[in-house]
Image (spheres, rainbow, N blue to C red):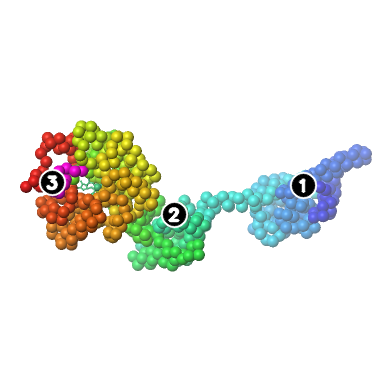
């Protein structure tokens, strides 16, 4: 590339070489003519190379200025960077071209100080002015040639930083904001909220932090695709923003979770109004994949200063409240309560303890006999899990089973129960107790685990047990929610001869018609009906109907929780098949059961009389 470039034009480069040559001559001691000519030629050649170099650097803008800061050189990259062609720039003052007004005096002074006192201008990052008026970020180096002559030339070498700045901005955006909704992320929200809380006195006002979690978002994603899920999030963001005041904050903190902060509230009424506003954002259906769809979300609310003094505490407590709301079902709203939080912390510890309990042998199975209502003979044993921690009182399965379900620990626990029950049954069979069956409880989550029923069958086989040796109990809701894979698995067990009972019958699903669809062999009437039957005609009627329907469907009927003679009499009148309850036997350890089966301990005589 040479100076004869159509864009830079001829003039500036010629003028530059002339000036450089003049300057060179001016600083050169007088020598003979031929020597001068040689030096001049060499100089021109070197200058030519220099010029070519400058011209070939597309990203490096080089400008030369005379002692009055008039442009004497302007390369093509300068044109690209600042918008002026070389002709336009030529002869104009630096400060009129690319120096923003605010820098004008400083630049002039700095240039003078360099020319006069030799104080160099240090390289630095600047924002200079483009012809359009916009600012351009550059890294600018300055070189003074002929510093101690009459015609000192300042060259500015500017590197365009726009791309880096843009990349930096993008990076900063990506680390501070959510790319889908462009809302701040959790960290940004936390620091914004903390500075909001730190700023200003908020003595008479309070702040509400609302945690919003879309219900069943995963299903929307699965059913309609991620695109529709994204669309929902963007639209919800728009609606939430619509009702925001300037001072309110909002962030997206995970895939389907948002947090909103509402400062400067004075009265309860303010709080309700803004909670209404958040709920309003969900009132109208969303149009997803061409269909309108009602979307709900659970809300948890924490208040400053009562429920936390900083962003992190407030978010955590609003999250706790939201998780509590989730248990209430779709669209629920909960305010944070300290005891909720304490309860969660306790549950968390309990789960950790339970995990250890498994390894430390703190768990055992107790067995509660079910006796024939007619003969009083022990027919079956229900295996019930017992946890006696190394320290402290026993913990009820009614408390730890739901926790284990939620944490996923139920699978290990369930495997342990199946294995232990099978091993016990094997031992009893080997000792000649061949009659009674052991029934184990299976929870919903256990059944949903792939291969659960196969593993159950394999365990029976491993211990050389027949399908009729171990039965299972499931609750109604588990059956209702079972998918076809689970139902097919249950059907296979059923056809092999495994006894399957519906536990706590009457407390779950309210329709009886589903009974005929499921592969079950027995109903266990919930103890609440048994308990109230003697005094409450309604409970008696339900119990009677359940026994009647059970029998019509060919099912065995078991009554749970029988505690007195009155209940027993009723159940016998209604022709209930089996009785389980404290009136006969409490759940007891395997050794006690063994003594009972061996006849070493007399059975109860309630039925013989
Ligand atoms: P469930 O399966 O309905 O078990 C019957 C519960 O009633 C047992 O409580 C039993 O001790 C109690 N019970 C029996 N007779 C009477 C009575 O006459 N009066 C009263 N008031 N209660 C009686 P438990 O042992 O506390 O178990 C509670 C629940 O925990 C069980 O209810 C079952 O749902 C669950 N569970 C227990 N063991 C296991 C297990 O190994 N796996 C699973 N998934 N759940 C289990
Ligand atoms: Mg049970
Ligand atoms: Mg039950």
State the residue position of label 1: 56
At numbered mark 1, what does the secondary structure look like: helix, strand or loop? loop
Q: In x, y percent, where is residue 68?
A: 76, 54
Q: Say which residue appears at 20% left-offset and 56% top-offset.
A: 547
Q: Looking at mark 1, is its residue's CB closer than 8 Å to ligand 1?
A: no
- State the residue in front, 563 or 126: 563
Q: In x, y percent, where is residue 550?
A: 23, 55
**Image-based side of 494 in relation to 81, left or right:** left
At numbered mark 3, what does the secondary structure look like: helix, strand or loop? loop
Distance between the alpha carbons at the discs numbered 1 and 3? 106 Å
Q: Does 500 appear above or below 325?
A: above
Q: Looking at mark 3, is its residue's CB closer than 8 Å to ligand 1?
A: no
**Image-based side of 298 in relation to 94, left or right:** left
State the residue position of label 2: 218
- State the residue in front, 334 or 576: 576
Residue 397 visible in the picture: yes
Residue 65 visible in the picture: no
Q: Which residues are magenta?
A: 371-380
State the residue position of label 3: 375
Nearest to N terminus: mark 1 or mark 3: 1
Nearest to N terminus: mark 1 or mark 2: 1
């Amino acid at each position: 590339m040479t100076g004869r470039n159509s864009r830079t034009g001829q003039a500036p480069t010629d003028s530059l070489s002339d000036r450089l040559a003049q300057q060179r001559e001016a600083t050169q001691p007088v020598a003979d003519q031929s020597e001068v000519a040689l030096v001049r030629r060499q100089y021109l050649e070197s200058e030519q190379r220099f010029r070519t170099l400058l011209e070939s650097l597309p990203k490096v803008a080089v400008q030369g200025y005379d002692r009055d800061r008039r442009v004497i050189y302007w390369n093509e990259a300068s044109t690209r960077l600042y918008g002026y062609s070389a002709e336009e720039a030529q002869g104009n003052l630096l400060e009129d071209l690319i120096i923003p007004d605010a820098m004008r005096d400083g630049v002039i002074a700095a240039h003078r100080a360099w020319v006069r006192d030799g104080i160099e201008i240090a390289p630095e990052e600047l924002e200079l002015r483009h012809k359009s008026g916009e600012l351009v970020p550059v890294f600018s180096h300055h070189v003074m040639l002929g510093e101690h002559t009459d015609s000192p030339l300042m060259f500015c070498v500017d590197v365009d930083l726009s791309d880096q700045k843009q990349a930096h901005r993008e990076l900063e955006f990506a680390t501070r904001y959510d790319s889908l909704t462009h809302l701040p992320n959790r960290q940004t929200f936390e620091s914004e909220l903390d500075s909001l809380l730190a700023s200003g006195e908020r003595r008479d006002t309070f702040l509400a932090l609302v945690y919003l979690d879309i219900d069943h978002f995963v299903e929307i994603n699965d059913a309609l695709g991620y695109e529709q899920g994204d669309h929902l999030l963007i639209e919800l963001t728009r609606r939430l923003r619509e009702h925001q005041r300037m001072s309110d904050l909002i962030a997206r903190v995970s895939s389907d979770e948002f947090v909103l902060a509402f400062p400067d509230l004075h009265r309860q009424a303010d709080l309700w109004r803004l909670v209404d506003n958040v709920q309003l954002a969900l009132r109208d259906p969303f149009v997803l994949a061409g269909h309108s769809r009602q979307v709900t979300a659970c809300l948890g609310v924490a208040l400053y200063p009562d429920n936390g003094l900083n962003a992190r505490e407030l978010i955590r407590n609003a999250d706790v409240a939201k998780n509590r709301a989730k248990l209430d079902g779709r669209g629920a709203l909960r305010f944070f309560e300290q005891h909720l939080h304490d309860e969660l912390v306790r549950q968390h510890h309990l789960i950790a303890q339970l995990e250890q309990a498994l390894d430390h042998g703190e768990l055992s199975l107790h067995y509660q006999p079910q006796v024939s209502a007619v003969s009083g003979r022990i027919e079956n044993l229900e295996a019930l899990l017992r946890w006696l921690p190394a320290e402290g009182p026993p913990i009820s399965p009614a408390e730890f089973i739901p926790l284990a379900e939620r944490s996923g620990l139920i699978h290990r626990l369930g495997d342990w129960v199946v294995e232990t029950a099978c091993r016990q049954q094997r031992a009893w069979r080997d000792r000649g107790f061949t009659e009674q069956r052991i029934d184990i409880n299976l929870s919903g989550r256990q059944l949903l685990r792939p291969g659960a029923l196969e593993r159950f069958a394999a365990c029976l086989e491993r211990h050389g047990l027949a399908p009729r040796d171990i039965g299972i109990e499931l609750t109604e809701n588990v059956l209702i929610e079972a998918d076809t894979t689970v139902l097919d698995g249950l059907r296979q067990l059923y056809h092999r001869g495994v006894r399957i009972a519906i536990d706590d019958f009457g407390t779950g699903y309210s329709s009886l018609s589903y009974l005929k669809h499921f592969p079950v062999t027995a109903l266990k009437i919930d103890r609440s009906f048994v308990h109230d039957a003697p005094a409450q005609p309604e409970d008696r009627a339900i119990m009677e109907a359940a026994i009647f329907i059970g029998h019509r469907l060919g099912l065995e009927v078991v009554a749970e929780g029988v505690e007195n003679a009155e209940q027993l009499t009723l159940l016998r009148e209604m022709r209930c098949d089996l009785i389980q309850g404290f009136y006969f036997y409490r759940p007891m350890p395997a050794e006690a059961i063994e003594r009972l089966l061996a006849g070493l301990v007399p059975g109860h005589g309630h039925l013989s009389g």
